[in-house]
């Protein structure tokens, strides 16, 4: 028992290895570079592989190839790199390739400010793929979450054969923090479900009414076919509308209908409060200070910290917001996730606090919004 | 041995397309080499060359335009025993040029077959990176303005150890393919061919004049010995095997007691080269050795050897939520670069804040209690000012104690550096 001093990016790297990650490829970019540094230290001595691509497109391409060959892959970047990943992300979604993608968000747009934090990619991560199919996005609040949620991200990527994002932020990733690693409540490691190598294998066939096809590695004894083109269960390109619809609706459903299994959140309930603050990422920490400060006042508020951002945990948000007269949402952008709250909570009074100046939202500003309603 | 072609998906190319010849020659080469389908992965790009994976009964991956080499690299690193063959057109060559260059430099054991037919066949015969300037193609006058690339010259310059220009029609095509596939490292064939669907409708190109043009091209410089080296994967595994595993993070033992309680914020304002970040880390470690929670948020420009260097540290008995500094208990001001970045904060400091500043540093007028230290006069090295300031605090049991600081030095440094740092700290106590 005792604490270690660690930044979020190192915790992401260590969490990845704890989840069985054995392949990493990345291209250096502030504020994500120290994930790459960590993986370069951790993986090669263990027989794993860590590569530096010539650009972000190559880095994620290496990961997709290695993942198809059976490895547990991760890449890490920031907003400008996510832009370059975009079509490879679409490939991973459409062709069911497990991969964990870390986005250490920095202030945008474009090259923006390399050393300033933001949560400006929240809708981009969801919609930055051609075809618009759903993805899973988890958002850590602190170094502890960086470790645990990265493990969860691997488990989800393996289980659902899909890309899973960790939406970190410079303010968590590059801030050192004391953390008691031994006290972490770690999930058990999930492995990809392998197909029976003796039965006849179709790479995208699903058994019974299951939603995720069993996997066999490219390069094994049974031939495996993978394609970025629209395909049927056999992995060949197809234009048959019925076959296409069946596959694409399955890709949509497998992520959406299981959301209750991976709805990660935290809450701080203040009895008698009439306002619920909803926040995610590093802003949730300022929100916690704000609601604690106002706990004894007559303008108290409770707090819901959402850690699974996509798919939107609609049931959770509805249930938690129901007892409150009003919701306050604070985020480090000019209004992204608040759109989801407006959609999920029609008729509810929602007050929004957005900030996009490279700094963290201060507890005092959140208090003001709580008190002004 | 049997053909590796896919009996369920017979090859379909335009009549007279040279891709068909390459397909059968590749099959022939694989048969002659004795490969089974499971031994081979065909990774394909976009365009007509992207049909190859479908026509082979091997492992197959078809991906995005220009990116085939990226997937192939991941596959080969994961499965070194697999024969990985990449097909791309002159379109993929253009759009994925960076990957071609890097693969040449890397020398990973892949075989790249560039099916070069001088135009984008699938989208209407537009110009590609290899279209001759005098050709009539689907891009109007644009190809007149751009020189075609001689990828073999480029590949050789980029370090590829096995490069060859070939015609899809030449007699020794199959043996050439076999040589490329056998090669232990990156091998690349620039295979010239005919696109009857688009290119030869408006341009005269025959097997004969392909051969004649190839013969006229400037010869490749002598590169084989110059670019010869160990294959990337092998070299990688050799290097990796000699890497030492880093130690796991060591939990910090609680051996001291903190002199104050509550939330204590400290900000160190310095410049590059003053070991500000290290001092911040030491303060966190000192806090942890007294059972405190700690956070450290740093701010420095990309020019790490010039400009400001700022570290914001919070110690607390409780878990730290907001990591920003709003009410610093102590400000350590060591360089104008750092001070200039926090002028607004400094001007608003209340009287309860303690500022330790280096002599000569100008501060905006404020209420805080200021202690000035003339580090230069005391012959303290510039890079030790921050550590000395921590020692001054420890001396007064403010924020940290001497025991906490010593514990931090022990945690942070190996013996030799520890002793040097300890000597710096002890000069403060000697006064």
Image (cartoon, coloured by chain):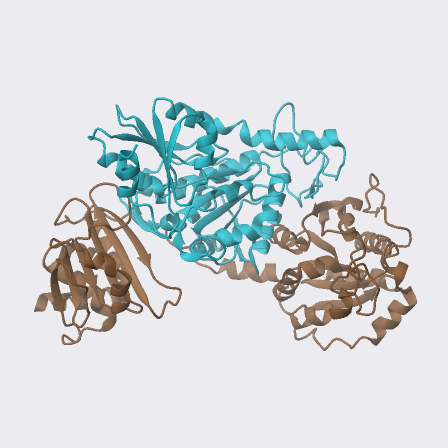
Check the image and report above or below for B348 versus B428.
above
Of residue B44 and residue A223, the one placed in the foreground of this image is B44
Left or right: residue B92 versus residue B125 is left
Vertical position of residue A195 compared to residue B117: above or below: above
| Foreground residue among B340 and B205 | B340
For the residue pair A329 and B78, the one nearer the viewer reads as A329
Q: In which quarter of the image is residue A30?
A: bottom left
Q: Which residue lies furthest to the left in this view?
A: B431
Q: Quadrant of residue B111?
A: bottom right
On the rendered structure, is A263 left or right of B333? right
Work out whether residue B397 can be spotted.
yes
State the count of labels.
0
Image quadrant containing the C terminus of chain B = bottom left
* Chain A drawn colour: cyan
A107 sits to left or right of B11: left
Residue at image point 13% right, 62% down: B392
Q: Position of residue A284 (x, y in %)?
A: 34, 39
Q: Where is residue A80 in the image (x, y as percent from the top left)?
A: 51, 54
Q: Which chain is brown?
A: B
Q: Residue at x 26, y 34 (%)?
A: A371
- Residue B293, image x, y percentages: 24, 45
């Amino acid at each position: 028992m005792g604490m270690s001093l660690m930044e979020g990016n190192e915790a992401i790297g260590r969490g990845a290895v704890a989840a069985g990650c054995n392949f990493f490829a990345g291209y250096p970019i502030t504020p994500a570079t120290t994930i790459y540094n960590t993986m370069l230290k951790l993986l090669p001595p263990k027989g794993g592989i860590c590569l530096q691509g010539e650009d972000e497109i190559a880095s994620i391409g290496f990961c997709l190839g290695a993942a198809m060959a059976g490895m547990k892959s991760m890449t890490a970047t920031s907003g400008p790199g996510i832009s370059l990943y975009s079509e490879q992300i679409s490939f991973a979604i459409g062709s069911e390739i497990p991969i964990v993608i870390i986005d250490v968000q920095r202030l945008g747009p474009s090259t923006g400010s390399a050393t300033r934090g933001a949560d400006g990619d929240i809708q981009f991560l969801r919609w930055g793929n051609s075809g618009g199919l759903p993805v899973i996005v988890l958002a850590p609040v602190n170094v502890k979450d960086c470790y645990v949620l990265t493990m969860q991200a691997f488990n989800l990527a393996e289980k659902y054969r899909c890309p899973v994002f960790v939406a970190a932020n410079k303010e968590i990733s590059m801030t050192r923090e004391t953390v008691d690693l031994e006290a972490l409540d770690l999930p058990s490691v999930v492995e990809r479900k392998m197909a029976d190598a003796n039965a006849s294998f179709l790479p995208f066939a699903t058994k019974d009414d299951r939603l995720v096809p069993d996997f066999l590695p490219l390069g094994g004894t049974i031939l495996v076919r993978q394609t970025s083109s629209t395909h049927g269960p056999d992995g060949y390109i197809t234009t048959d509308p019925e076959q296409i619809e069946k596959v694409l609706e399955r890709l949509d459903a497998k992520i959406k209908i299981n959301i209750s299994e991976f709805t990660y959140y935290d809450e701080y309930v203040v009895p008698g409060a009439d306002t619920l603050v909803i926040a995610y990422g590093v802003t949730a920490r300022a929100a916690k200070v704000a609601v604690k400060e106002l706990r004894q006042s007559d303008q108290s508020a409770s707090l819901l910290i959402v850690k699974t951002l996509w798919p939107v945990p609609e049931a959770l948000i509805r249930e938690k917001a129901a007892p409150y007269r009003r919701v306050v949402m604070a985020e480090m952008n000019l209004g992204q996730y608040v759109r989801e709250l407006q959609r999920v909570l029609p008729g509810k009074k929602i007050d929004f606090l957005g900030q996009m100046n490279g700094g963290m939202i201060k507890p005092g500003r959140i208090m003001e919004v709580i008190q002004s309603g | 041995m049997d053909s590796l072609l896919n009996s369920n998906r017979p090859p379909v190319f335009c009549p007279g397309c040279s891709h068909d010849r390459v397909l059968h020659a590749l099959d022939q080469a694989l048969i002659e080499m004795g490969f089974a389908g499971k031994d081979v992965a065909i990774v394909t790009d976009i365009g007509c060359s992207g049909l190859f994976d479908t026509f082979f009964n091997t492992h197959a991956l078809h991906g995005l335009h220009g990116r085939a080499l990226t997937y192939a690299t991941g596959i080969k690193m994961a499965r070194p025993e697999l024969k990985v063959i990449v097909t791309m057109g002159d379109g993929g060559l253009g759009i994925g040029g960076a990957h071609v260059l890097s693969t040449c430099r890397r020398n990973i054991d892949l075989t790249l077959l560039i099916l070069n037919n001088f135009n984008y066949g699938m989208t209407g015969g537009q110009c590609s990176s290899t279209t001759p300037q005098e050709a009539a193609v689907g891009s109007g006058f644009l190809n007149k303005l751009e020189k075609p690339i001689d990828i073999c010259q480029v590949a050789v310059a980029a370090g590829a150890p096995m490069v060859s220009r070939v015609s899809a029609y030449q007699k020794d095509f199959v043996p050439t393919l076999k040589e490329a596939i056998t090669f232990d490292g990156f091998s690349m064939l620039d295979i010239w061919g005919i696109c009857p669907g688009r290119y030869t409708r408006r341009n005269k190109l025959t097997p004969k004049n392909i051969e004649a043009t190839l013969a006229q091209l400037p010869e490749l410089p002598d590169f084989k010995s110059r670019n010869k080296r160990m294959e990337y994967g092998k070299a990688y595994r050799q290097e990796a095997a000699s890497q030492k595993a880093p130690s796991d993070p060591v939990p910090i033992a609680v051996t001291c007691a903190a002199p104050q309680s509550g939330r204590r914020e400290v900000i160190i304002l310095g410049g590059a080269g003053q070991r500000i970040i290290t001092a911040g880390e030491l303060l966190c470690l000192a806090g942890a050795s007294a059972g405190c929670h700690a956070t450290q948020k740093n701010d420095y420009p990309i020019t790490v050897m010039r400009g400001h260097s700022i570290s914001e540290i919070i110690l607390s008995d409780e878990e730290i939520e907001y990591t920003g500094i709003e009410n610093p208990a102590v400000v350590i001001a060591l360089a104008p670069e750092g001070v200039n970045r926090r002028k607004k904060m400094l001007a608003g400091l209340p009287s309860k804040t303690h500022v330790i500043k280096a002599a000569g540093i100008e501060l905006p007028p404020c209420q805080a209690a200021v202690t000035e230290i003339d580090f230069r006069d005391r012959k303290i090295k510039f890079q030790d000012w921050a550590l000395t300031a921590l020692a001054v605090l420890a001396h007064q049991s403010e924020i940290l104690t001497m025991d906490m600081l010593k514990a931090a030095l022990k945690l942070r440094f190996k013996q030799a550096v520890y002793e040097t740092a300890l000597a710096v700290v002890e000069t403060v106590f000697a006064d």
